[in-house]
Image: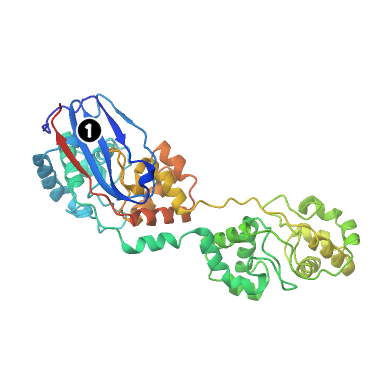
Amino acid sequence: MSSANDPPSRKGRVAQIWATSWLSGLRYSLVTLVVVSGIAGLLVSEFHFRSTSAQPRITLGDDAGELRTLYANAEDVAAGKRLAESSCAGCHGISGVSTSAGVPHLAGQRAAYLYLELKNYQAGVRGVTAMNNAVKFLSQDALFEVSAYFASLAPPQPSATNGAIAATLDPVQVGKTAAAGCAGCHGETGVSKTSGMPSLVGLDPKYLVAAMKAYKSGQRKNDLMKSMVANVSDATMDTIALYYGLQKAERAQTPAPGDRAAGAGASAACAACHGTEGVGGSAAIPSIAGQDAQYLAVALQAYRQRSRAEETMKGIAASLDDDTIKNLSAYYAAQEPKQPNVRKPLTVDEWSQRCDRCHGVNGNSTDPRLPALAGQRLDYLEKVLHDYQTGARKSPQMAAMSDMLTDHDIDSLAAHYAAQKAGVVVYVIVPAR
């Protein structure tokens, strides 16, 4: 067995052996063979998988000091425990299981990753925090030993509730649930069946959110709508608008009395903003194709009476008589609505498949220099992803990945990985042949 005092500047490589996909659904061991300058170690971890996708092979350089953690001995771990008791236990717990909000679990984390992050704290790469002061004067041996100690501990058990949380955080499902109270007036999928009630399909989600906020603030006058959205958060409004934006755009199932041909002739003034067939080209301007005719007529009358605030519409509606309003409404109600350009967000399973490429299946990293996510604190995972988004924490790869995440995606991913069972990782050092 190599001594902890052996120099870390060893050449080597990591070769990963993956079980084939026909073992899908079975319990089996994932084995990673680590060869470090004639010393072979087996990293064995048990998981429940459906399938695997190979992680990239790692090439280790001459100065890969973090590899020293792969062959720590019992004395190194004992020394690391003594340091953890005096310097780390207050925040991370002597067992490496944090009970403090926003403070990560360290038990069972990959030792090489811990070593590298401690070096980053020493160098100031991770910003100015209490961790900088905690590790500022520690030697390289001390960093190595405390990393080896925390990595040797059994990882924490995941919270049983986090999986259920992740399942409820799909934004489309959240929006559908929140929109249940709207169905009585606007139809179950946002297609109106009641004259005077607008359809909510075919609208850009940004427009729909702006409309809800206008009712909430009183800018739009409607006591019923104001009461309906009074306690709806901005985030929930986003999911409601997303849900309706993804529903099939259909014409309102309501009567549209009026002369459509006459309405088409009178629509020239509307086409510049709403399009010749009522499909707007801007999120700030509603599409009115297929909209309920009575709702359109009431809206135009409100603009004409100046009780609805929008200066451009007030000017256009001022010259319209009742017959023209009726005919315009009939014309636009007869037009075919168009599906807005709304991307259906990835599910938490789809996002986690991307994350697993680097962090291992279900967040159990097989790369000793990439962190395991399984069983980590939910609030810590949320904070880290937000920090990568804002640039408070630096990583080109993580910045690119997190930039695409919505708040709901972050909440779902954090809950997903916090609910995963962390695999027990054991390094077995065997003599070289």
Q: Nearer the viewer, residue 48 or 88?
A: 48
Image coordinates for residue 99, horizontal then vertical, percent: 25, 59
Q: Which of 317 and 384 is in front in this view?
A: 384
| In the image, farthest residue toward the front | 22
Number of marks present in the image shown? 1
Which residue is pictured at 78% across the width and 55% down the height?
278
Q: Nearer the viewer, residue 273 or 348?
A: 348
Label 1 crowding class (10 Å Cα cut-off): few <14, some 14-19, many 20+?
many
* Residue 236 appears in view: no
- Specify the quadrant of the image occupied by residue 167: bottom left
Q: What element carries label 1?
A: helix
Q: Nearer the viewer, residue 21 or 271?
A: 21
| In the image, farthest residue toward the left | 75
Direction from residue 373 to residue 273 in the image, left or right: right
Image coordinates for residue 238, horizontal then vertical, percent: 56, 59
* Residue 261 appears in view: yes
- Name the amino acid type tagged 1: Leu
Q: Quadrant of the N terminus?
A: top left
Image coordinates for residue 186, horizontal then vertical, percent: 66, 70
Q: In which quarter of the image is the C terminus?
A: top left
Direction from residue 182 to residue 270 in the image, left or right: right
Q: In this view, does 3 lie above or below 387?
A: above
Q: In this view, does 221 lie above or below 62?
A: below
Q: In this view, does 347 lie above or below 173?
A: above
Image coordinates for residue 18, horizontal then vertical, percent: 33, 39
The figure's colour scheme reads: rainbow
Which residue is pictured at 79% across the width and 58% down the height?
335
Label 1 sits on residue: 67
